[in-house]
Structures are given as C-alpha cells and as structure tokens.
Image: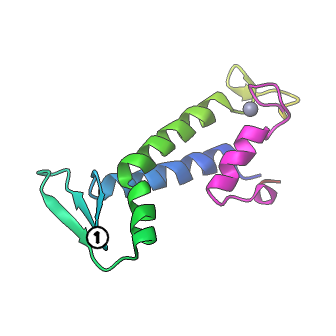
Amino acid sequence: MADLHGEIRAAIEARCGLARAASDGPWTVHGMSIRGFTHLNHSDCLVVRHTWPQEAAHIVANDPVTVLRHCQEDLRVLERHQQATLGGAPLASHEECRCVAPWPCPEVLSLARRYGIEENDHG
Ligand SMILES: [Zn+2]
C-alpha cells in the first residue's frame, strides 16, 4: 500500500518549491500585464504581457506568497491528521487517524483531492 500521507506531503512540498523558485512578489496587475518582484534584489523583473484582465486577476490572486501561505496551512493540517501509531509503529487496528476518525479521515482525503491524489491508489 502506498503511503497516502507521504504522497500528500511530497505534493505539498513540490508546490512550495515551485512557489519559492518564482518571483516572490507582490504581483500586481497593470492594465493587461502582470508585474512581480524578484526576491534577489526586489527589482521589478517579472512582466507578463497581454493577459486578459480576468486571467491577470486570477494569476495575481495565486502569486507565490499566496501559494506558500496555502501550502504551509496544508502542511499544518496534514501534521494534525496522521495515521495513529503506538511507539512509532502503526496500531494493530491502524485504520484510525489521530483525530480518531477512520483512516484516511475526511481532512486527509480533502488534502489528497486538493493535490490531485486519488485515494483508490492507496489500497
Ligand atoms: Zn484526521
């Protein structure tokens, strides 16, 4: 059985990595363009031109700072929702989350869906 918790964590961390590698922002809309700032010297380096206003607004609403904030919260949720163990080993009836719901609990399943991970791939 694949490790659902580990796969979710890897997906969150991969998304964090993409956000950290991008110009951190803030990103702003300027007419039909998007501008961002690099974290290296905070100069205006990112310019995406010729976007539709609704696309520009969507991209800016999902800038790296926002994505990192979402990922950090997702990691906190994932930390609270782990398969119950005893002394580091899964319980004999290890089909339970720390939140006492059956494993995988609704919070873990929600995170899996957010990152495009199918529960059926995990037994
Ligand atoms: Zn849980």
Residue at the image position 52 percent from the left and 37 percent from the top: 73
- Indicate yes or no: mark 1 CB to ligand 1 under 8 Å: no
Pick the residue in front: 42 or 113: 42
- Magenta-drawn stretch contains 43: no
The percent position of residue 26, horizontal first and vertical second, equals: 28, 51
Quarter residue 23 falls in: bottom left
Residue at the image position 81 percent from the left and 59 percent from the top: 120
Residue at the image position 45 percent from the left and 63 percent from the top: 58
The percent position of residue 11, horizontal first and vertical second, equals: 55, 54
> Against 53, is 90 above or below?
above
* Stretch in magenta: 96-121
Residue type, label 1:
Gly
Quarter residue 46 falls in: bottom left
Quarter of the rendering occupied by the C terminus: bottom right
> How many marks on residues?
1
- The picture quadrant for ligand 1 comes to top right
